[in-house]
Image (cartoon, rainbow, N blue to C red):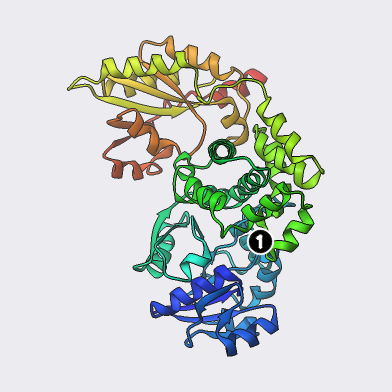
Amino acid sequence: MKKIGVLGAGTWGMALSRMLSNTGHAVTVWSAIEKEVDEFSTKRVHPNLPKMQIPDEIVFTKDIEEVCKEKDILLFAVPSVFVRSTTATAREFIPDGQIIVDVAKGIEADTLYTMSEVIQDELQKDGGHKNVKLVALSGPTHAEEVSLDMPTTIVSACSDMEAAELVQDVFMNTCMRVYTNGDTTGVELCGAMKNIIALAAGVSAGLGYGDNAKAALITRGMAEISRLGIAMGCMEQTFNGLAGIGDLIVTATSIHSRNNRAGHLIGQGYTPDEAVKEVGMVVEGINALPAAMKLKERYRVEMPIIEAINGVINEGADPAKTVKALMGRHKKTELSKSMLDLNFENTILKNKRSGGMKRVITYGTFDLLHYGHINLLRRAKALGDYLVVVLSSDEFNWNMKHKKCYFTYEQRKELLLATRYVDLVIPEESWEQKRNDVHEYHIDTFVMGDDWRGKFDFLKEEGVEVVYLPRTPEISTTQIKEDLNK
């Protein structure tokens, strides 16, 4: 049994509180609205979940110190706009090392922080909360169904896998199946952005458009979210999972979705304020739009659907005309690479997949190609028969490595291919793509310089040999640039 404090008594917080209590945990719930505490304590019914009976074992409190004190887990279940203020109020009562689970979905407009980053930022202002473990819990989960013990899946995300697995164990039962993920930012980004796409799907339905339009919005909406996430360094697999496409599907199609309902009303002619009032609960998609637009600009990512719905919500654009403008955009392909590149890669891989073929992969920027690079490539190729080099893209170098190359990606790619050691060059676009790469390209051996020793041992779990090669000590790209500047 775990002692769990829940901050927030909305539908999601209460559905989870009931579930946790019914599985044997001691649950205490705090609300900033004192009237809620009194009503829930006596009536044991939530007005927005009328079919759910609140267990007698759940304790309600108006004292935020009581809900935080001596708890194994603190569950933050307040709306995204109140996450920072609630954290500030609770901070002095939260011990360092506390496991905090956040279920709010949003991006803070001013800082562009995810909700777990907001909590971390606010806690660390006193300098005494450096070891708090923050876990994001997100996925296709409507409170209305969880409150009735309907089968549900969700993702526990944390860079500390031990914390993610502890939360997995606590929340998992016969009705709730929990998966883990180390990509906290990706999981939280999905949770915030999918609400905006759900708004768009609702507007489409309100205008009288059918399932074709809804499917298009879901599919292309996830393409936009994925594009942004990858630019931010998130894992592509996250967007194809429960927290990504899974949550988007349920939010964009369900009658329980407040974002979908609000969008439907706007499509029928309601103003955004009127729609929110009619829904009667927080519509997180509207709250997420300012941050989404800023992220779009910061990472220079094309997001036409999110830009269009922002025009409808915040700039008074006509929904019907907005749809026509989206449909009339210039022609595009949905492939991330050209057919020439795809055919080239597939042909090479097909020809090389013979029984004894051993494939090696390495990563790098390889700017100002020098004999230190050649030594690394030569030794890497000697470990197998076929060498794949994953070359940092210009965008990845600038956004994630914070450095500018002398040569462009295409120029660096041609230089690598001109050596006799490299068989294939593919782009590196995120820190997290390595697991996917070793499977997609059927890799046997992963090679990096020994200054990365130990950093990629996790790939051994994928059945890949991991080798760290000594670098050529007297040469480096940085040293070359410094010498030339002198």
Residue 486 visible: no
- Looking at the image, the residue that sits furthest to the bottom is 42
Foreground pick, 144 / 236: 144
- Looking at the image, the residue that sits furthest to the front is 208
Decide: few, some or many residues near mark 1? Use Cα within 10 Å; few <14, some 14-19, many ≥20: many
**Position above or below: 116 against 208:** below
**Position above or below: 86 against 351:** below
Q: Which residue is mark 1?
A: 80
Quadrant housing residue 21: bottom left
Quadrant location of the N terminus in the rendered image: bottom left
- Look at 38% across and 66% down and name the residue there: 175
**Position above or below: 50 against 469:** below
- Looking at the image, the residue that sits furthest to the left is 355
Residue 483: x and y in percent read 61, 21
Name the secondary structure under disc 1: helix
- Look at 47% across and 28% down and name the residue there: 364
Quick check: 4 left or right of 403?
Answer: left
Quick check: 116 left or right of 356?
Answer: right
Residue 438 visible: yes
Quadrant housing residue 287: bottom right
- Look at 64% across and 66% down and name the residue there: 123
Quadrant location of the C terminus in the rendered image: top right
**At label 1, which amino acid type do we have?**
Ser
